Image: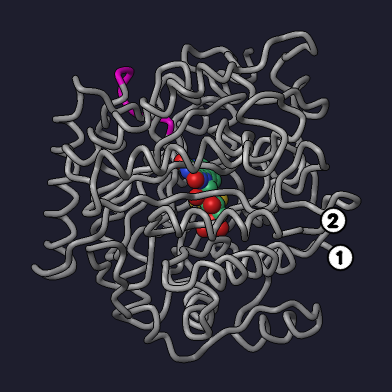
Amino acid sequence: MATFERFNFKTIDEIRDKVKKLGVNISFADDLSPLAKPVKIGNVVSPNSIAVLPMEGCDSERDGSPSELVRRRYRRFAAGGAGLLWFEACAVVHEGRANPLQMYLTEKNVGAFEKLLKEVDEEAKKHNGSDHRPVKVLQLTQSGRYSRPDDKPAPIIAQHDPMLDPRVGISPDDPVVTDEYLDALIEKYVKSAKLAREAGFDGVDIKACHRYLVSELLASHTREGRYGGSFENRMRFLLDTIKAVRSEVGDDFIIASRFNVFDAHPYPYGFGVDKEDFWKPDLTEPLALVKLMVENGVNLLSNSAGNPYYRFPQVTRPFDTPTIGGEIPEEHPLESVARLFELTRQIQKAAGNIPVVGNGYSWLRQFLPNAGAANIADGSCTLVGIGRQAFAYPDAPKDMLEKGAMDPKKSCIACSKCTQIMRDHGRTGCVIRDSEVYLPLYNEARNNATKK
Ligand SMILES: Cc1cc2nc3c(=O)[nH]c(=O)nc-3n(C[C@H](O)[C@H](O)[C@H](O)COP(=O)(O)O)c2cc1C
Ligand code: SF4
């Protein structure tokens, strides 16, 4: 691992040189045309190969319906021209909300989501041409050990974990979630998927990343019963949910999964890790899972990694500055980016024709289109996903496609302030490039957190 450094590249040749010195596998293409390629996802077509990744704002209404801030965020994403809009984490049950303002789709508020999607389509057309229609997928979640539905921790765990339990106040004799709860939860996903279709989404994502409940189940080696222990048991919840949703929604609806392929967390508590060295990915099980998901009719995948709440958040999102009190990583951010790219490369290879959305691009700033185009061109992913960059610079896709370049002055600077707002239980967005709206919200959340 090389010494940590902040981003300090003015030209593409400078970043190419650094990549060469570090010996990491990141390429930068001069030809950006791969980004413009339409992509078939299930029975719909994304007008280009750029995706906005799910980015939670923690800012819905109390009943889970889109607030004005949510509507503003998605109008901005839609105007920005990405072909795929992957909507943020939306709870399937109240007790699984990560915060009291997490999106939550119910029979009562489905009309508000329908209205949001109409606005999104109109905005997309207005700014990108009358035939531009983004694919819209909603991420469905149960936040598990990170549930905070009523503004205080209310963890629901799949297995005990000596490293993670103390961080959310779990003691060794607290119960783990029962098999009966999980059986019934599958039906909640089915219900949410049907509501999502009614609202006008093109598909849903059965979220299994970042160590929320379904992600933790993939790693539940120490759990007893039908959902823990063997590979078959640990994959059961995710696969049974995919099958149950598919049998209800038919073939004309996208089923996606954003799933962790490498937890960077010690065995027997981590998924996709070498048993002796948790810093080494072992993709044997994640690749077998990809095969099973594809056999069961999944139309779209996005791999992620790490646990953003734990010690090594650079595994999920490479950064320049950690959140307050966070550690400086013992690796160069380009190594963190290269790890995410390599994981996507392996998952795309296993997924064959099923599109995989890559991630970890935002740290690359204005050079991200070049890295994305190179990855699409050599088959390392099908779509390039942008997370923080979409908060900071929602028009980035349009600039990549129309101007062939991103403006470094508008770019995300990987400062972790949007994550800091989340940790402080505030409403989040880009504090740097959208400061009129989010600097006051950052200060408000900081003040509240400091008082507590
Ligand atoms: C504030 C914030 C909110 C996020 N919300 C979600 C989410 O709702 N669902 C999800 O799968 N990932 C979420 N992520 C992770 C991003 O989608 C993405 O994987 C990560 O930021 C790396 O991509 P980037 O380098 O383009 O930012 C979030 C990240 C941040 C910083
Ligand atoms: S606050 Fe803005 S600039 Fe900082 S990491 Fe978040 S999106 Fe990027």
Q: Is residue 108 above or below residue 33?
A: above
Q: Residues within 10 Å of mark 2 (few under 14, many from 20)?
A: few
Q: Ligand 1 closer than 8 Å to the CB at disc 2? A: no
- In this picture, residue 38 sits left or right of residue 325: left
Q: Which residue extends farthest left?
A: 130
Name above or below for residue 147 compared with residue 246.
Answer: above
Q: Nearer the viewer, residue 252 or 420?
A: 252
Which residue ends up furthest to the right in the rendered image?
276
Residue 229 is left or right of residue 140, and the answer is right
Discs 1, 2 touching: Cβ within 8 Å: yes
Q: Residue at x 30, y 53 (%)?
A: 254
The residue lying at 50 percent from left, 17 percent from top is: 181
Q: Amino acid at mark 2?
A: Glu
Identify the disc placed on residue 257.
none
Q: Position of residue 265 (x, y in %)?
A: 78, 43
Q: Identify the residue position indicated by label 1 in the image.
A: 1
Q: Quadrant of the C terminus?
A: top right
Look at the image and tell me whether residue 34 can be seen. Answer: yes
> According to the image, label 2 marks what residue?
330
Q: Quadrant of residue 20?
A: bottom right
Q: Position of residue 110 (x, y in %)?
A: 19, 29
Q: Is residue 405 magenta?
A: no
Q: Is residue 431 in view? A: no
Which region shows up in magenta? 58-63
